[in-house]
Amino acid sequence: MLLSTGRFYATSAGGGGFYAPVLTDSMSNAAPASSYTFTSRAIGTAHANRQLVLCIATMAPVGRAITSITVDGSSTGLVIELNDFSHSAFIARVPKSTGTTATFVVTFAGGIEAMALGIYDTRPITPTPVDKGSGGNSVTSFTIPDIAVSTGGFLIGCGLTYPQQTSAPVYNGVDTLTENAELSVGGTYPITVCFFSASTTENATTNDPGISSASSGAKRAAFISFL
């Protein structure tokens, strides 16, 4: 049935199969501000079915909501907002069929210390997520419980840890959750930010993706799955 949807593309590696999510760019800005602009950032190959998934991590004196995100002037839809004390995680999505670069503007309800942004090029069958979740704790390893995934779909997420330390993905599904980038973001409360993704080959409702590090510390994570 999935093949009848027309979702059979070349993979990001150039072979046959379902299109795997591609982290096209990642960046950070450690200057305090309430609005951040990232100009001419890579967004992958133009495609009629392309949807950008944006993963955002922040540090702030208090939890700050995102008031707007624009991509080349068009507003995105915020899907996940973990608006927590000091460290927060967000995920947004926006259809973007044209272009290979774009300018991103992220505006917050008040000033923050720093932020990081990861941009994924994806090709979902439907823009509506299969599942999503977010949370945090001060531990060595933290996961989001029971994120449903679908065969032929994908899972994307971001995680952060404070204080800064090398981090890694945690996942109990049959597929490999890959760390696509890890950024050290400075400022008053320096954090390590990671961007994760996996192509999913199972239908499951009890998968737990997350982030780990060698030492205990504040962890925040947000994950979203699509078909």
Image (tube, helix red, strand yellow):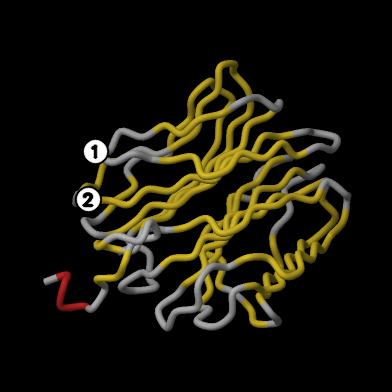
**Does 85 sit left or right of 118 as displayed?**
right
- Which quarter of the image is occupied by the C terminus? bottom left
Which residue lies under the disc numbered 1? 174
Q: How many marks?
A: 2
Residue occupying the far top of the picture: 215
User: Which residue is at the front of the view, 74 or 84?
Assistant: 74
Where residue 37 appears, as percent x and y from the top left, is 79, 66
For the point 40% across and 39% down, the residue is 209
Residue topped by disc 2: 201
- Front residue of 226/135: it is 226
Using the image as rendered, state which of residue 172 and residue 137 is in the foreground: 172
Q: Quadrant of the N terminus?
A: bottom left
Residue 82 in view, yes or no: yes
The amino acid type, in three-letter code, at marker 2 is Thr
* Res. 226 in view: no
Give whichever of 11, 140 is nearer the camera: 11
Residue 135 image label: none
On screen, 139 above or below 170?
Answer: above
Which three-letter amino acid code belongs to the residue tagged 1? Val
Rendering coords of residue 102 (x, y %): 67, 73
Look at 50% across and 72% down and name the residue there.
45
- Check disc 2 and report its element: helix, strand or loop: loop
Query: Residue at the location (88% across, 50% down)?
Result: 32
Spatial CA span between label 2 and label 1: 8 Å
Q: Is residue 117 left or right of residue 79?
A: right
Q: Residue furthest left?
A: 1
Labels 2 and 1 touching (C-beta < 8 A): yes
Q: Residue at x 69, y 41 (%)?
A: 87
Up/down of 199 relative to 41, above or below: above
Viewed as shown, does residue 154 lie left or right of 135?
Answer: left
